[in-house]
Image (spheres, grey):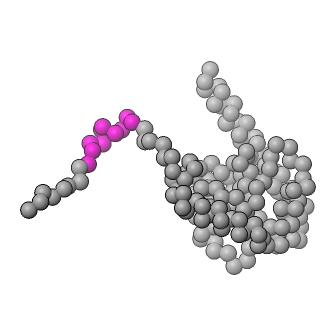
């Protein structure tokens, strides 16, 4: 007869003062390489077969002079694929198409905001019908995000002194 192995739990007081180890998996996120590769392939496919609203907004971003800020189309951020992502600002733009799963979209937005990425949702209809108002809204969102980052940087620098 063999001896049974039992699960040995650590005393919580032993692990309270040690920080958890950084996960090296998934290019910084806790995602398997296989899953991440599948997401990148799916994003590539989405870039090939974009909607009209997506193409129109991508064209505006391509011709706009936004200084150091660029928006990447169908970018993989963590375990989500966002329509446009500005890594430097920590800002994502999602285009709401008709017939889209709202519960999934809200869950994805919540998980992105939990890691510090601000998500802006824009209806596809608005992009096609009133591009100027959409671009103004995006510009205001970018300015707000720049101001937030500046405040956090100032607070961080003051905390160091």
Asked whether residue 42 appears in the rendered view, the answer is: yes
Q: Is residue 53 left or right of residue 9?
A: right
Q: Name the outermost residue toward the bottom.
A: 99
Number of numbered discs visible in the structure rendering: 0
Q: Is residue 140 left or right of residue 40?
A: right
Q: Position of residue 74 (x, y in %)?
A: 72, 62
In the rendered image, the vertical position of residue 28 relative to residue 15, given as above or below? below
In depth, the one of 97 and 32 nearer the eye is 32
Type of secondary structure dominating the magenta stretch: loop
Q: Is residue 146 left or right of residue 21?
A: right
Residue 104's image quarter? bottom right
Q: Is residue 22 left or right of residue 77?
A: left
Residue 123's image quarter? bottom right
Q: Position of residue 93 (x, y in %)?
A: 74, 59
Asked whether residue 121 appears in the rendered view, the answer is: no
Q: Residue at x 73, y 45 (%)?
A: 88
In the rendered image, the vertical position of residue 146 relative to residue 58, given as above or below? above
In depth, the one of 7 and 141 nearer the eye is 7
Magenta residues, start to end? 9-18
Q: Residue at x 73, y 36 (%)?
A: 150
Q: Residue at x 88, y 59 (%)?
A: 60
């Amino acid at each position: 007869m063999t001896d049974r192995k039992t699960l040995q739990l650590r005393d919580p007081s032993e692990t309270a003062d040690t920080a958890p180890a950084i996960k090296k998996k998934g290019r910084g996120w806790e995602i398997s390489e296989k899953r991440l590769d599948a997401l990148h392939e799916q994003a590539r496919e989405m870039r090939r077969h974009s909607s009209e609203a997506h193409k129109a907004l991508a064209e505006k971003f391509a011709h706009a002079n936004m200084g150091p800020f660029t928006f990447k189309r169908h970018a993989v951020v963590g375990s989500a694929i966002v329509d446009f992502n500005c890594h430097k600002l920590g800002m994502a733009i999602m285009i709401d198409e008709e017939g889209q799963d709202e519960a999934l979209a809200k869950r994805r937005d919540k998980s992105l905001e939990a890691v510090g990425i601000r998500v802006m949702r824009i209806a596809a209809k608005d992009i096609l019908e009133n591009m100027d108002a959409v671009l103004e809204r995006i510009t205001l969102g970018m300015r707000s995000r720049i101001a937030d980052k500046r405040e956090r940087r100032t607070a961080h620098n003051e905390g160091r002194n």
